[in-house]
């Protein structure tokens, strides 16, 4: 029997957009199946069905998973309204698939960034229920102490939200420049989260780098370069995402999370 799949899943799997964005495309009326506009989210399609988004046929692409060492001075959108450099400028012609960033890093943040054309995978990595650990190295203003950073462990209020448990480690202090180097592991991905967390404890971030996304780091990958993830790495990320999502979250101190 022919395999029927949900329209939004097929669009996401083809690398056109994330699952959520694919749903928006469908409901906004720009998706056609065999020439007919379809706005129903549950619609099932077969491999024979001709799908178009904005009049462009959707072709299934091989899935590609990249780990980039993002440099500072570029945005993680596909295109920038102010014409700033984007991470896509570093991908080049070598990758013909339509990859896009999994989540975001700020313009002035460097470090580990995943890119893919697998909408399902991207969705699983970014979903709010998926608490994948992300470790950042921050140079913060002032001399931070275990005491001044302690609120980060239980959660701090940023805007209208209290953050989930996090773990920190003071790497070094620089009294001359009145700053501290701190490693922070969080399990969420809110807008400007790390900067807002440090601000909440009175130590604004001067410089930020994402050192790890789950077990992945940028060792051996120069800034502005990328590498393909191994199949086993993709599998392990999906396993972690599933495990984290199935836990009775939201607040628990994560496995393998170092407490200092
Ligand atoms: N938190 C931030 O504040 N900025 C980033 O780029 C990533 C996490």
Image (spheres, rainbow, N blue to C red):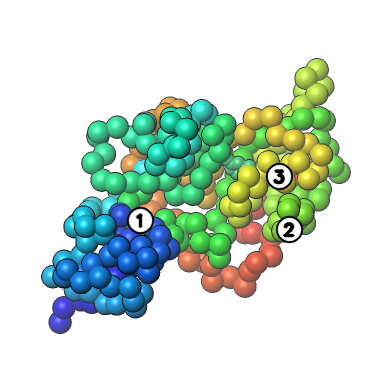
Question: Percent from the top left, x then y, of residue 13?
Answer: 30, 60
Alpha carbons under labels 2 and 3: distance apart: 12 Å
Q: Secondary structure at mark 3?
A: helix
Q: Residues within 10 Å of mark 3 (few under 14, many from 20)?
A: some
Question: Can the viewer see residue 234?
Answer: yes
Asked whether mark 2 and ligand 1 are closer than 8 Å, the reply comes as no
Residue at image position (44%, 49%) is: 102
Q: Residue at x 34, y 76 (%)?
A: 40
Quickly name the residue at label 2: 160
Q: Is mark 3 within 8 Å of ligand 1?
A: yes
Residue ID at (33%, 34%): 91
Check whether the beta carbons of the residues at disc 2 and disc 3 lie within 8 A of each other. no
Question: What residue did someone put label 3 on?
Answer: 196
Query: Residue at label 1?
Result: 17
Q: Can you tell me which quadrant of the image ligand 1 is in?
A: top right
Q: Position of residue 78 (x, y in %)?
A: 39, 42
């Amino acid at each position: 029997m022919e395999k029927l799949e949900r329209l939004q899943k097929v669009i996401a799997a083809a690398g056109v957009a994330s699952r959520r964005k694919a749903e928006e495309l469908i409901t906004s009326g720009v998706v056609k199946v065999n020439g007919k506009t379809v706005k129903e989210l549950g619609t099932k399609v077969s491999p024979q069905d001709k799908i178009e988004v904005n009049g462009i046929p959707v072709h299934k692409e091989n899935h590609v998973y990249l780990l980039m060492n993002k440099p500072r001075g570029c945005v993680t959108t596909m295109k920038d309204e102010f014409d700033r450099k984007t991470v896509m400028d570093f991908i080049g012609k070598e990758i013909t698939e339509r990859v896009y960033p999994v989540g975001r890093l700020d313009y002035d943040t460097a470090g580990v960034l995943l890119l893919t054309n697998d909408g399902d995978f991207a969705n699983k990595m970014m979903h709010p229920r998926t608490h994948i650990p992300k470790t950042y190295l921050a140079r913060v203003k002032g001399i931070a102490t275990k005491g001044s950073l302690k609120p980060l462990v239980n959660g701090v209020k940023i805007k209208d939200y209290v953050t989930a448990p996090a773990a920190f480690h003071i790497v070094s202090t620089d009294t001359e420049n009145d700053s501290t180097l701190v490693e922070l592991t969080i399990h969420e991905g809110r807008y400007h989260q790390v900067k807002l967390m440090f601000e909440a404890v009175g130590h604004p971030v001067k410089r930020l780098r994402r050192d790890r996304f789950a077990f992945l780091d940028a060792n051996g990958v120069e800034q502005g370069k990328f590498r393909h993830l191994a199949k086993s790495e993709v599998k392990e990320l999906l396993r972690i995402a599933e495990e984290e999502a199935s836990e009775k979250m939201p607040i628990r101190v994560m496995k393998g999370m170092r407490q200092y």
